[in-house]
Image (cartoon, rainbow, N blue to C red):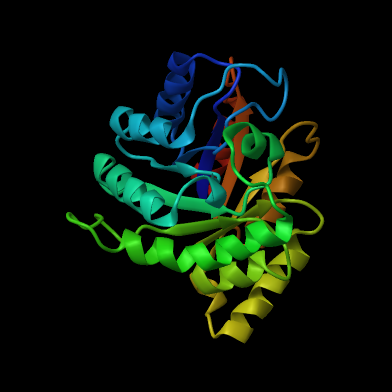
Protein backbone atom coordinates (compact mmCIF):
# COMPACT_ATOMS: atom_id res chain seq x y z
CA UNK A 1 0.00 0.00 0.00
CA UNK A 2 1.35 3.40 -1.02
CA UNK A 3 0.19 6.67 0.52
CA UNK A 4 0.42 9.75 -1.68
CA UNK A 5 0.15 13.46 -0.93
CA UNK A 6 -1.65 15.48 -3.59
CA UNK A 7 -0.43 19.03 -2.99
CA UNK A 8 -2.60 21.55 -4.83
CA UNK A 9 -0.24 24.29 -6.08
CA UNK A 10 -2.59 27.17 -5.33
CA UNK A 11 -3.23 29.90 -2.74
CA UNK A 12 0.33 29.68 -1.40
CA UNK A 13 3.82 31.01 -1.98
CA UNK A 14 6.20 28.63 -3.70
CA UNK A 15 8.19 28.41 -0.45
CA UNK A 16 5.06 27.04 1.23
CA UNK A 17 4.51 24.50 -1.55
CA UNK A 18 8.14 23.39 -1.35
CA UNK A 19 8.02 23.02 2.44
CA UNK A 20 4.84 20.95 2.17
CA UNK A 21 6.58 18.58 -0.25
CA UNK A 22 9.57 18.23 2.06
CA UNK A 23 7.30 17.66 5.06
CA UNK A 24 5.24 15.02 3.24
CA UNK A 25 8.41 13.06 2.46
CA UNK A 26 9.63 13.36 6.05
CA UNK A 27 6.26 12.10 7.32
CA UNK A 28 6.65 8.96 5.24
CA UNK A 29 4.60 9.56 2.09
CA UNK A 30 5.48 7.31 -0.83
CA UNK A 31 4.45 9.67 -3.62
CA UNK A 32 3.92 13.43 -3.96
CA UNK A 33 1.70 14.78 -6.73
CA UNK A 34 0.73 18.24 -7.91
CA UNK A 35 -1.80 19.04 -10.66
CA UNK A 36 -1.48 20.50 -14.13
CA UNK A 37 -3.58 23.68 -14.21
CA UNK A 38 -2.89 27.38 -14.64
CA UNK A 39 -5.49 28.78 -12.25
CA UNK A 40 -6.92 27.66 -8.89
CA UNK A 41 -9.70 25.10 -9.03
CA UNK A 42 -11.40 26.35 -5.87
CA UNK A 43 -11.30 29.37 -3.61
CA UNK A 44 -10.31 32.72 -5.09
CA UNK A 45 -10.26 32.08 -8.87
CA UNK A 46 -7.41 34.53 -9.44
CA UNK A 47 -5.39 33.45 -6.42
CA UNK A 48 -1.73 32.48 -6.58
CA UNK A 49 -0.89 29.41 -8.65
CA UNK A 50 2.21 27.73 -10.10
CA UNK A 51 3.01 25.64 -13.17
CA UNK A 52 3.25 21.90 -12.64
CA UNK A 53 6.27 20.61 -14.54
CA UNK A 54 8.59 23.40 -13.49
CA UNK A 55 7.57 22.53 -9.95
CA UNK A 56 8.34 18.83 -10.47
CA UNK A 57 11.92 19.70 -11.39
CA UNK A 58 12.21 21.57 -8.09
CA UNK A 59 10.68 18.69 -6.14
CA UNK A 60 13.16 16.34 -7.77
CA UNK A 61 15.96 18.38 -6.19
CA UNK A 62 14.50 18.97 -2.71
CA UNK A 63 13.33 15.38 -2.12
CA UNK A 64 15.33 12.16 -2.24
CA UNK A 65 13.04 9.17 -1.76
CA UNK A 66 9.43 9.83 -2.82
CA UNK A 67 8.09 9.33 -6.31
CA UNK A 68 6.81 12.55 -7.90
CA UNK A 69 4.36 13.39 -10.67
CA UNK A 70 1.31 15.29 -11.87
CA UNK A 71 -2.13 14.09 -10.95
CA UNK A 72 -2.55 14.54 -13.81
CA UNK A 73 -0.81 16.21 -16.74
CA UNK A 74 -3.24 17.65 -19.28
CA UNK A 75 -2.50 16.02 -22.61
CA UNK A 76 -3.66 19.13 -24.52
CA UNK A 77 -1.07 21.58 -23.21
CA UNK A 78 2.13 20.15 -24.70
CA UNK A 79 3.25 18.32 -27.79
CA UNK A 80 3.63 14.64 -26.72
CA UNK A 81 7.24 14.47 -27.88
CA UNK A 82 8.12 17.58 -25.89
CA UNK A 83 6.27 16.25 -22.86
CA UNK A 84 8.17 12.98 -23.15
CA UNK A 85 11.51 14.79 -23.16
CA UNK A 86 10.43 16.86 -20.16
CA UNK A 87 9.55 13.60 -18.40
CA UNK A 88 12.91 12.06 -19.31
CA UNK A 89 14.70 15.10 -17.91
CA UNK A 90 12.76 15.12 -14.63
CA UNK A 91 13.36 11.38 -14.40
CA UNK A 92 17.10 12.08 -14.39
CA UNK A 93 16.90 15.03 -12.00
CA UNK A 94 15.02 12.77 -9.56
CA UNK A 95 17.22 9.68 -10.12
CA UNK A 96 14.32 7.69 -11.55
CA UNK A 97 11.40 8.72 -9.34
CA UNK A 98 8.98 10.22 -11.88
CA UNK A 99 5.45 8.90 -12.44
CA UNK A 100 3.97 10.06 -15.76
CA UNK A 101 0.38 10.92 -14.82
CA UNK A 102 -1.80 12.02 -17.73
CA UNK A 103 -5.41 12.67 -18.65
CA UNK A 104 -7.50 14.24 -21.42
CA UNK A 105 -8.06 17.64 -19.74
CA UNK A 106 -11.25 19.39 -18.71
CA UNK A 107 -10.72 22.86 -17.13
CA UNK A 108 -11.99 25.28 -19.78
CA UNK A 109 -10.40 28.42 -18.32
CA UNK A 110 -6.92 26.93 -18.76
CA UNK A 111 -7.65 26.44 -22.44
CA UNK A 112 -9.27 29.75 -23.24
CA UNK A 113 -6.82 31.99 -21.38
CA UNK A 114 -3.71 30.20 -22.63
CA UNK A 115 -4.88 29.95 -26.24
CA UNK A 116 -5.58 26.21 -26.54
CA UNK A 117 -8.59 24.89 -28.43
CA UNK A 118 -11.02 23.51 -25.86
CA UNK A 119 -12.97 21.38 -28.32
CA UNK A 120 -15.24 18.72 -26.87
CA UNK A 121 -14.77 15.93 -24.36
CA UNK A 122 -14.73 13.54 -27.31
CA UNK A 123 -12.07 15.46 -29.23
CA UNK A 124 -9.85 15.73 -26.17
CA UNK A 125 -10.18 12.00 -25.52
CA UNK A 126 -9.38 11.18 -29.15
CA UNK A 127 -6.28 13.36 -28.87
CA UNK A 128 -5.24 11.42 -25.77
CA UNK A 129 -5.76 8.15 -27.64
CA UNK A 130 -3.54 9.32 -30.50
CA UNK A 131 -0.87 10.96 -28.32
CA UNK A 132 -0.32 8.19 -25.76
CA UNK A 133 1.68 5.93 -28.15
CA UNK A 134 3.76 8.92 -29.25
CA UNK A 135 4.46 9.88 -25.64
CA UNK A 136 5.40 6.35 -24.60
CA UNK A 137 7.63 5.78 -27.63
CA UNK A 138 9.48 9.07 -27.19
CA UNK A 139 10.03 8.55 -23.44
CA UNK A 140 11.96 5.38 -24.26
CA UNK A 141 14.50 7.14 -26.45
CA UNK A 142 16.85 10.05 -26.07
CA UNK A 143 20.37 10.33 -24.77
CA UNK A 144 20.64 9.53 -21.96
CA UNK A 145 17.74 7.09 -21.74
CA UNK A 146 15.47 7.27 -18.69
CA UNK A 147 16.65 5.59 -15.50
CA UNK A 148 13.71 3.20 -15.73
CA UNK A 149 10.67 2.59 -17.90
CA UNK A 150 8.71 5.57 -16.63
CA UNK A 151 5.36 4.31 -15.30
CA UNK A 152 2.21 5.67 -16.93
CA UNK A 153 -0.67 6.71 -14.67
CA UNK A 154 -3.96 7.52 -16.40
CA UNK A 155 -6.59 9.44 -14.47
CA UNK A 156 -10.31 9.24 -15.22
CA UNK A 157 -13.21 6.82 -15.23
CA UNK A 158 -15.02 7.21 -18.54
CA UNK A 159 -16.18 3.73 -19.44
CA UNK A 160 -16.10 3.89 -23.24
CA UNK A 161 -12.77 5.62 -23.86
CA UNK A 162 -10.65 6.43 -20.80
CA UNK A 163 -10.81 2.94 -19.27
CA UNK A 164 -10.17 1.42 -22.70
CA UNK A 165 -7.00 3.52 -23.11
CA UNK A 166 -6.04 2.69 -19.52
CA UNK A 167 -6.28 -1.03 -20.22
CA UNK A 168 -3.94 -0.64 -23.19
CA UNK A 169 -1.27 1.71 -21.85
CA UNK A 170 -1.37 2.34 -18.09
CA UNK A 171 0.70 0.95 -15.26
CA UNK A 172 -1.55 2.76 -12.77
CA UNK A 173 -5.23 3.75 -12.95
CA UNK A 174 -6.33 6.67 -10.77
CA UNK A 175 -9.93 7.47 -9.85
CA UNK A 176 -12.02 8.55 -6.87
CA UNK A 177 -12.95 6.24 -4.02
CA UNK A 178 -16.77 6.41 -4.05
CA UNK A 179 -19.88 4.30 -4.60
CA UNK A 180 -19.06 3.84 -8.29
CA UNK A 181 -15.49 2.64 -7.80
CA UNK A 182 -16.20 -1.11 -7.76
CA UNK A 183 -18.25 -0.86 -10.96
CA UNK A 184 -15.57 1.20 -12.73
CA UNK A 185 -12.91 -1.23 -11.56
CA UNK A 186 -14.89 -4.10 -13.11
CA UNK A 187 -15.25 -2.15 -16.36
CA UNK A 188 -11.48 -1.73 -16.48
CA UNK A 189 -11.05 -5.47 -15.95
CA UNK A 190 -13.48 -6.10 -18.82
CA UNK A 191 -11.48 -3.80 -21.10
CA UNK A 192 -8.31 -5.65 -20.13
CA UNK A 193 -9.93 -8.92 -21.19
CA UNK A 194 -10.99 -7.42 -24.53
CA UNK A 195 -7.52 -5.98 -25.17
CA UNK A 196 -5.53 -9.00 -24.01
CA UNK A 197 -4.06 -7.33 -20.92
CA UNK A 198 -3.64 -8.95 -17.52
CA UNK A 199 -5.60 -6.63 -15.18
CA UNK A 200 -3.20 -7.36 -12.34
CA UNK A 201 -0.55 -5.42 -14.28
CA UNK A 202 -2.48 -2.18 -13.64
CA UNK A 203 -2.23 -0.87 -10.10
CA UNK A 204 -5.24 0.89 -8.60
CA UNK A 205 -4.85 4.38 -7.14
CA UNK A 206 -7.72 6.21 -5.47
CA UNK A 207 -8.24 9.74 -4.26
CA UNK A 208 -9.98 9.84 -0.89
CA UNK A 209 -11.99 12.83 0.33
CA UNK A 210 -11.34 12.81 4.08
CA UNK A 211 -13.72 15.66 4.96
CA UNK A 212 -16.50 14.44 7.23
CA UNK A 213 -15.33 10.86 7.64
CA UNK A 214 -16.99 9.36 10.71
CA UNK A 215 -15.89 5.73 10.54
CA UNK A 216 -12.20 5.56 9.70
CA UNK A 217 -11.99 1.85 10.47
CA UNK A 218 -14.67 1.11 7.88
CA UNK A 219 -12.84 3.26 5.32
CA UNK A 220 -9.55 1.49 5.95
CA UNK A 221 -11.22 -1.93 5.80
CA UNK A 222 -12.88 -1.10 2.48
CA UNK A 223 -9.66 0.07 0.91
CA UNK A 224 -7.81 -3.03 2.09
CA UNK A 225 -10.55 -5.38 0.87
CA UNK A 226 -10.58 -3.73 -2.56
CA UNK A 227 -6.84 -4.40 -2.94
CA UNK A 228 -6.17 -0.73 -3.63
CA UNK A 229 -2.48 -0.13 -4.28
CA UNK A 230 -2.31 3.60 -3.61
CA UNK A 231 -4.35 6.11 -1.59
CA UNK A 232 -4.03 9.81 -2.37
CA UNK A 233 -4.88 12.58 0.09
CA UNK A 234 -5.30 16.06 -1.37
CA UNK A 235 -4.53 19.32 0.41
CA UNK A 236 -4.28 22.95 -0.70
CA UNK A 237 -2.43 26.04 0.44
CA UNK A 238 -1.54 28.08 2.22
CA UNK A 239 -1.48 25.85 5.30
CA UNK A 240 -1.20 22.35 3.73
CA UNK A 241 -2.63 20.52 6.75
CA UNK A 242 -1.10 17.03 6.49
CA UNK A 243 -2.74 15.51 9.60
CA UNK A 244 -4.96 13.16 7.56
CA UNK A 245 -1.96 12.15 5.46
CA UNK A 246 -0.22 11.20 8.71
CA UNK A 247 -3.25 9.15 9.74
CA UNK A 248 -3.09 7.15 6.51
CA UNK A 249 0.67 6.66 6.82
CA UNK A 250 0.19 5.27 10.33
CA UNK A 251 -2.47 2.91 9.01
CA UNK A 252 -0.17 1.77 6.17
CA UNK A 253 2.59 1.06 8.68
CA UNK A 254 0.21 -1.01 10.80
CA UNK A 255 -0.66 -3.40 7.97
In the rendering, at what x and y percent does residue 196 appear? 54, 85
Residue sticking out furthest to the left: 144
- Which of these two is toward me, 221 or 65? 65
In this view, the residue in front, 26 or 31, is 31
Tell me if 60 is positioned left or right of 160 in this view.
Answer: left
Who's the residue at 68% across and 30% down the image?
Answer: 41
Residue 180 in the image, given as x and y percentages of width and height? 80, 59
- Comparing 113 with 129, the one in front is 113
Up-down relation of residue 33 to residue 139 (above or below) = above
Q: Is residue 49 left or right of residue 211?
A: left
Number of on-image labels: 0
The residue nearer to you, when weighing 174 against 3, is 174
Which residue does the image show at 58% across and 34% down from the upper left? 114
Residue 154 in percent (x, y) is at 56, 58
Give residue 226's quadrant in the image: bottom right
Residue 19: x percent and y percent?
Answer: 43, 19
Q: Using the rendered view, name the quadrant where residue 223 is placed.
A: bottom right
Q: Residue at the location (43% across, 35% down)?
A: 28
Confirm whether residue 136 shows in the render: yes
Q: Is residue 248 above or below residue 26?
A: below
- Residue appearing at x 61%, y 25% in the figure: 236
Residue 171 at least partly seen: no
Left or right side of 62 for 248: right
Amino acid sequence: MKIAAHLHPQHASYAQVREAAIEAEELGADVIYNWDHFYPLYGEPDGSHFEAWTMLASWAEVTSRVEIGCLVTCNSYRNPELLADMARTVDHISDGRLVMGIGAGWFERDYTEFGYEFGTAGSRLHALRDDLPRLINRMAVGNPAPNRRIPILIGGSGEKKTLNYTSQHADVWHSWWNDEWEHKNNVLDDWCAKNGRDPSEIKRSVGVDTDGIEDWDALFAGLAAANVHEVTIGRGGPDYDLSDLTRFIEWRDSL
